[in-house]
């Protein structure tokens, strides 16, 4: 407790030697430190654990949002190969 009183006295004595503008800066800095410590206390609170989900479940709302009209591409291997060859020929 003695160290705490000593620190408080030192701060007060030093603050008395500052002009009013500098004293306001000290007050602002102390308020910032206080705000920062409160903010960190909120971050430390345990996060709500969520049940892990699959990628399919996470992307469910986007499945089928783009309609190419080609249907199931896994059944159209011939068209995919032709498109790949055409793409490769156009790049070079």
Image (tube, rainbow, N blue to C red):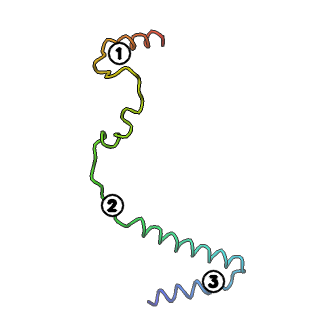
The crowd level at tag 1 (other Cα within 10 Å; few <14, some 14-19, many 20+) is few
Which of discs 2 and 3 lies nearer the camera? The answer is: 2
The crowd level at tag 3 (other Cα within 10 Å; few <14, some 14-19, many 20+) is few
Residue positioned 42% across, 30% down in the render: 66
In three-dimensional space, the C-alpha distance between marks 1 and 3, rounded to whole angstroms, equals 78 Å
Q: Nearer the viewer, residue 18 or 49?
A: 49
Query: Which picture quadrant has residue 27?
Result: bottom right
Q: Which mark is residue 14?
A: 3
16 versus 55 height, above or below: below
Residue identified by numbered label 2: 48
**Going by the image, does 31 lie left or right of 68?**
right
1 versus 64 height, above or below: below
> Answer yes or no: do the residues labelled 1 and 2 have beta carbons within 8 Å?
no
88 versus 8 height, above or below: above
Residue identified by numbered label 1: 80
In three-dimensional space, the C-alpha distance between marks 2 and 3, rounded to whole angstroms, equals 45 Å
The crowd level at tag 2 (other Cα within 10 Å; few <14, some 14-19, many 20+) is few
**Going by the image, does 9 lie left or right of 40?**
right
């Amino acid at each position: 407790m003695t160290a705490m009183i000593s620190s408080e006295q030192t701060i007060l004595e030093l603050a008395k030697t500052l002009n009013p503008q500098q004293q306001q800066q000290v007050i602002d800095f102390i308020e910032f430190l206080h705000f920062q410590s409160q903010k960190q206390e909120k971050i430390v609170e345990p996060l709500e654990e969520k049940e892990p989900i699959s990628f399919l479940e996470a992307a469910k709302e986007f499945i089928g949002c783009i309609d190419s009209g080609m249907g199931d591409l896994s059944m159209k291997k011939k068209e995919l190969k032709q498109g790949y060859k055409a793409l490769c020929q156009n790049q070079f």
